[in-house]
Image (spheres, rainbow, N blue to C red):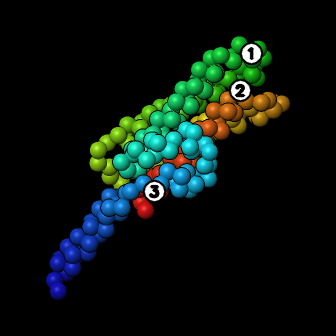
Amino acid sequence: MNTKLIILKNSLSLLISLVLFAFPTANAIPEAVSFCKETLEIDFCAKYIGYQRIEAARDFSDLYLIAVSETKIEVNDAITQINRVRQKFNGLLGKNRISVCEKKYKIAATSFHKSLEVGKKKSKSITDFAEMSQRTQAGFEAVHECEDEWSKHGPRQQSPLTFYFNNIQKLCQITRVIINKFYA
């Protein structure tokens, strides 16, 4: 067989494999309760994602949009909380910590917003899925850095944002389950 023909045949096989990998045919959402069990946060999933919304979702792309939208809401609520509690921190350390958190949550808001924009695309490439995953991870890392800030550079303080951090952490875990389902 001609070398060029072998290369063309192998390239075509690789391309078909990538297309099937990127656009799986079985993108059906499992029963809502079953899906939430996979997230390891059954009650949280039921409350924040909602069984009705899971069952109404056409595919994992819709479910992804729901999860990231909920995450954005939590991030925005945390930013509102920062503005509410800012005056409670009079010392330099507390003011610095709140300032760091404000910056980190703004970074997270931008990351989740951009992830949502990519998720809204009608057809997604492998690169889009990678970007969605990376932006979700970047958003989570930003809020994690805020949470860590409350134990650095002096005595440990209770973060006024722990509630939001925990919710965002759980929503990001749910989002990772969804992204993994794209590849199943």
The residue indicated by pointer 2 is 160
Q: In terms of secondary structure, where does tag 2 sit? A: loop
Q: Amino acid at mark 1?
A: Lys
- Check disc 1 and report the residue beneath it: 88
**How dense is the environment of label 1, judged by Cα within 10 Å: few (below 14), some, or many (20 and up)?**
few
Res 182 → quadrant: bottom left
Residue 57 in the image: state x and y as whole percent.
39, 45
At numbered mark 1, what does the secondary structure look like: helix, strand or loop? Answer: helix
Q: Is residue 81 shown above or below 167?
A: above
Number of the label disc, if any, that sits on residue 68: none
Compared with 22, 128 (above or below) is: above
| Residue 149 percent location from the top left of the image | 71, 33
**Residue at (38%, 56%) from the top-left corner?**
28
Query: Is 174 in front, or is 161?
Result: 174
Give the mark, 2 or 1, whose residue is nearer the N terminus.
1
Helix, strand or loop at mark 3:
loop
Q: Earlier in the sequence, mark 3 or mark 1?
A: 3
Residue underneath mark 3: 30
Residue at figure coordinates x 74%, y 15% from the top left? 88
Of residue 64 and residue 135, the one placed in the foreground of this image is: 64
Q: Residue at x 16, y 83 (%)?
A: 2
- The residue carrying pointer 2 sits among few (fewer than 14), some (14 to 19) or many (20 or more) residues within 10 Å by Cα, namely some
How many labels were placed on the picture? Answer: 3
For the residues carrying marks 2 and 3, which lies nearer the camera in this image? 3
Task: State the image quarter where residue 80 is shown.
Answer: top right
Between residue 19 and residue 34, name the one nearer to us: 34
| Amino acid type at mark 2 | Pro
Q: Quadrant of the N terminus?
A: bottom left
Q: Position of residue 166 (x, y in %)?
A: 65, 39
Dot 2 or dot 3: first in sequence order is 3
